[in-house]
Image (tube, rainbow, N blue to C red):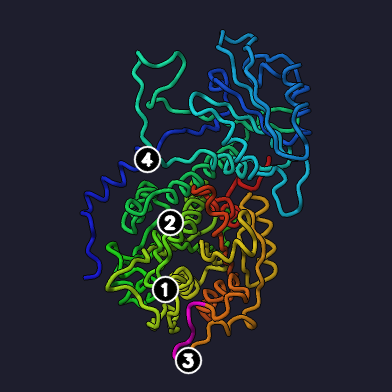
């Protein structure tokens, strides 16, 4: 058999367990009580420059906000050193004077964001916020982060942006200091960093709405899950262990059911795209189908007839390029090629936690594009689940091939579905088209395109439209011997759009709903780390309770 598992089930479970245990180094808390505030060893206040000025001027609120009273002139001078037209920071060590119990000197930071941004950015500059918080947070102790979200901006997208600054996965080793060798106040390897996040409105009052806090926690957990999966090495995140991740996430949630089509069964049932791309690997390819049915208590007269949504994720756990092999530098980092699946999984998990009142299906196309005797060859002709034949002219254009099977499945079998969203690190051309922070989107209606752009701006998972013109571009896939090829003839002819149109061509003819393609090759990673892109976009698109709301 081509599928000879390299480890036993017990070994897979042990490897999965040890990875999770070794990864936890920083905890996030959104508790609105003052307990953690009073134990904080450092405080970070972040917001737009003008909003920070309002907060700094509220000297009578210092004790209730910080747990002590820093001298007003210190904060005023810090603010004056910042700029309203660029992201900037100011840090000082201040004495802790106030009614609280005596505490050691405190690290105080003001992080200023631009007062105004252009129309294609989140008003709170969430990408800049992530970078500032990451670089300004101490590596140990209890850090209190206060975010000025003003009166109009939902807190959950901000929570997602902050979560990106604190990735979970690491395999770094450090020499643990003994108590004898440790300096006073320094942590050891065992010390866990606690990040406590508080949101402030325009008047400097703490935002405490329960639904908003739940959404913030769920969004942050979804982002950190997605980041952890993207950061894991391919010897740990195989198709088999990825499936175990999914089962473990929902093993105690009876609103989620899981179906798997694995290995040779894919071939027998006609999923020729996923099967052929993954058949050379030591771990079998699989199609994971997770279905969330909302519990009766969240179903109302208003939403009982809501249509379902299908989320499809590209989960290529490693991409060698196949027989069209990548170069050495081009192959490094290809563990990230499952970033689309991680984004939709994290969003799905958060939507389930928030008990979103509509049915959501998640389809994960899991495969390793490996090299070996069984590998699909350029010139092979495969039959996709749609029934269409595809001549492989580039085994390194595998993502669209696996996604085509899942999109065909969703549009053929789910009569109650009116929106299919596929997400993938699909093309390097996406970075040229829309950059490193904005995903390129392709939508089959102008209305859906506008909804997706708006969802991107609201969630901080920015998105921008690609050229939608299938009748002009489909000729790029012309084949003499099959229905189509899998890669374009002319790479200078809107190839990012072409890749999306390849997937679209496998939509079942009976389907009349919306289709949205999200190519997030650029925003899916930054500085060799996963960003959790897609979690917020999914939560906005499915209408998760509390995510886009302010009470």
Query: Of label 4 and label 2, which has the lower sequence position?
Result: 4
Q: Secondary structure at mark 4?
A: loop
The residue where tag 1 is placed is: 395
Query: Of label 1 and label 3, which has the lower sequence position?
Result: 1
Q: Nearer the viewer, mark 1 or mark 2?
A: 2
Q: Secondary structure at mark 1?
A: loop
Q: Residue 407: horizontal and vertical position, in percent?
A: 48, 71
Q: Secondary structure at mark 2?
A: loop
Q: Quadrant of the N terminus?
A: bottom left
Q: Nearer the viewer, mark 2 or mark 3?
A: 2
Please tell me whether the stretch drawn in magenta is mainly helix, strand or loop.
loop
The residue where tag 3 is placed is: 480
Q: Quadrant of residue 50?
A: top right
The residue where tag 4 is placed is: 171
* Residue 355 visible in the snapshot: no
The residue where tag 2 is placed is: 332
């Amino acid at each position: 058999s081509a599928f000879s598992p390299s480890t036993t089930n017990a070994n897979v479970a042990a490897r999965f367990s040890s990875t999770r245990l070794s990864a936890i180094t920083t905890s996030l808390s959104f508790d609105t009580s003052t307990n953690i505030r009073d134990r904080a060893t450092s405080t970070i206040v972040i917001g737009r420059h003008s909003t920070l000025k309002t907060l700094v001027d509220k000297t009578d609120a210092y004790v209730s906000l910080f747990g002590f009273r820093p001298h007003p002139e210190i904060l005023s001078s810090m603010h004056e050193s910042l700029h309203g037209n660029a992201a900037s920071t100011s840090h000082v060590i201040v004495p802790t004077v106030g009614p609280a119990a005596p505490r050691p000197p405190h690290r105080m930071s003001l992080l200023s964001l631009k007062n105004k941004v252009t129309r294609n950015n989140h008003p709170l500059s969430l990408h800049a916020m992530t970078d500032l918080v990451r670089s300004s947070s101490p590596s140990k102790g209890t850090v209190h982060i206060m975010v000025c979200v003003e009166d109009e901006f939902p807190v959950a997208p901000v929570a997602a942006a902050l979560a990106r600054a604190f990735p979970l996965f690491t395999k770094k080793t450090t020499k643990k200091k003994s108590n004898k060798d440790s300096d006073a106040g320094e942590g050891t390897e065992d010390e866990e960093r606690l990040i406590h996040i508080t949101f402030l409105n325009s008047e400097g009052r703490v935002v405490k709405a329960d639904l908003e806090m739940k959404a913030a926690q769920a969004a942050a957990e979804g982002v950190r899950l997605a980041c952890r999966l993207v950061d894991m090495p391919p010897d740990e995140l195989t198709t088999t262990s990825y499936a175990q991740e999914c089962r473990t996430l929902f093993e105690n949630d009876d609103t989620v059911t899981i179906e798997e089509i694995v290995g040779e069964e894919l071939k027998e049932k006609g999923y020729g795209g996923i099967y052929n791309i993954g058949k050379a690997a030591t771990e079998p390819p699989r199609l994971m189908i997770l279905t969330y049915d909302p519990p009766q208590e969240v179903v109302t007269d208003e939403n009982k007839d809501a249509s379902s949504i299908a989320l499809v994720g590209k989960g290529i756990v490693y991409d060698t390029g196949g027989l069209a092999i990548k170069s050495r530098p081009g192959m490094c980092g290809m563990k990230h090629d499952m970033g689309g699946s991680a984004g939709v999984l994290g969003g799905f998990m958060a939507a389930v936690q928030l008990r979103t009142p509509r049915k959501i299906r998640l389809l994960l196309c899991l495969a390793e594009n490996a090299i070996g005797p069984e590998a699909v060859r350029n010139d092979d002709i495969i039959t996709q689940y749609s029934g269409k034949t595809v001549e492989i002219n580039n085994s390194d254009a595998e993502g669209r091939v696996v996604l085509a099977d899942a999109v065909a499945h969703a549009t053929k079998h789910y009569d109650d579905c009116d929106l299919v969203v596929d997400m993938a690190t699909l093309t390097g051309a996406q970075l040229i088209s829309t950059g490193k922070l904005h995903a390129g989107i392709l939508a089959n209606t102008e209305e859906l395109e506008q909804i997706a752009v708006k969802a991107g701006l609201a969630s901080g998972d920015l998105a921008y439209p690609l050229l939608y013109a299938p009748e002009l571009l489909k000729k790029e896939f012309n084949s003499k011997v099959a229905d189509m090829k899998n890669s374009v003839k002319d790479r200078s002819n809107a190839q990012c759009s072409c890749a999306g149109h390849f997937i679209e061509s496998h939509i079942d003819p009976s389907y009349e709903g919306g289709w949205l393609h999200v190519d997030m090759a650029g925003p899916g990673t930054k500085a060799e780390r996963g960003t959790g892109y897609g979690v917020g976009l999914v939560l906005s698109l499915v209408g998760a309770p509390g995510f886009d709301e302010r009470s």
